[in-house]
Image (cartoon, rainbow, N blue to C red):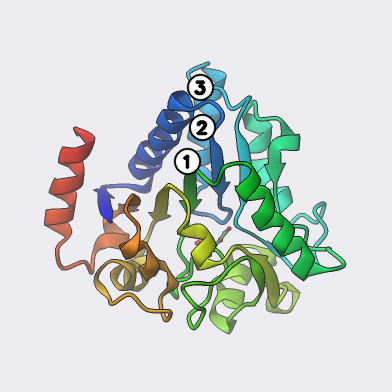
Amino acid sequence: MEIVICKTREEASKLAAKAIIDQVKAKPKSVLGLATGSTPVLMYKELGKAVKAKKVSFREVKSWNLDEYYGLAPTHDQSYRYFMNENLFKFIDINIKNTHVLNGLAKDPVKECKAYEAAIKRAGGIDLQVLGIGSDGHIAFNEPGTSLASRTSVVYLTPSTIKDNARLFFKGKMDEVPTRALSMGVGTICEAKKIILLAFGEGKQDAVKGMVEGGVSQFCTASALQMHPDAWVYCDEAAAKKLKLKYYYAWRSATKLGL
Ligand code: F6R
């Protein structure tokens, strides 16, 4: 696991965007795994700018998102499909038909999850997966206590995630946040060829510490990335504050990135 520590989230977002741009330039038919939430927004803005400046094209790219709230229609303004359309897809030249988000209204959610995994496999697997991290160390909606071998399925949100999501979205109303979601599993995520995880701000300090320097455990599902051969964490100084070896990680990753 490589840890890239930047002074600000702006700087980290630019570097993470560069990793995606490099991937798509090297393989125009890349399959991307995408995340929602507040963390990737700046990075998505950078991708929009790069497309506008004709530095990269997503015309042949296919994408699969990590998760969706169970019970929300794709048109609901808090659904993850809506989020992706508003924060990324409308700013890049991707063919919307090539973008995939789990259907929160699926009549048979188990079937929906299985079909989603099968479609990713048919596309050749995910080349680059974007992740954020929850304050409890979750990736996608894989809460503490979820098997590290889990596959795409219906999952249950913890009270702390419901609270975090109500604060950031849903206008602060806890009772409006769905308590279940459809989510890629940890095992599914770890099959991506390359992973980049973004983490910003003091609120992510404990999660980042657990992911990078804690044991590999289902109590911090992001810790599974320690076992991945090409996982990169882009964080700001605030999120990296509790890391014991932060100076070593910063030096090593800057050297590898030629910074
Ligand atoms: C989003 C997702 C979640 C978020 C995480 C952090 O698709 O899968 O795991 O990445 O909850 O959310 P933010 O970025 O809002 O702090």
Q: Are marks 1 and 2 in contact (CB under 8 Å)?
A: yes
- The residue drawn where x is 76% and y is 54% is 77
Residue indicated by mark 2: 47
Give whichever of 13, 63 is nearer the camera. 63
Secondary structure beneath label 1: helix
Q: Amino acid at mark 1?
A: Met
The quadrant where residue 200 appears? bottom left
**Where's residue 134, x and y in %?**
48, 68
What crowding class fits label 3: few (fewer than 14 Cα within 10 Å), some (14-19), or many (20 or more)? many
Residue indicated by mark 1: 43
Q: In the figure, 178 relative to 74: above or below?
A: below
What crowding class fits label 2: few (fewer than 14 Cα within 10 Å), some (14-19), or many (20 or more)? many
Q: Are marks 2 and 3 in contact (CB under 8 Å)?
A: yes
- The residue drawn where x is 33% and y is 49% is 230
Q: Earlier in the sequence, mark 2 or mark 3?
A: 2
Horizontal side of 70 relative to 210 (left or right) equals right
Q: Amino acid at mark 3?
A: Val
Residue indicated by mark 3: 56
Q: In the figure, 158 relative to 18: above or below?
A: below
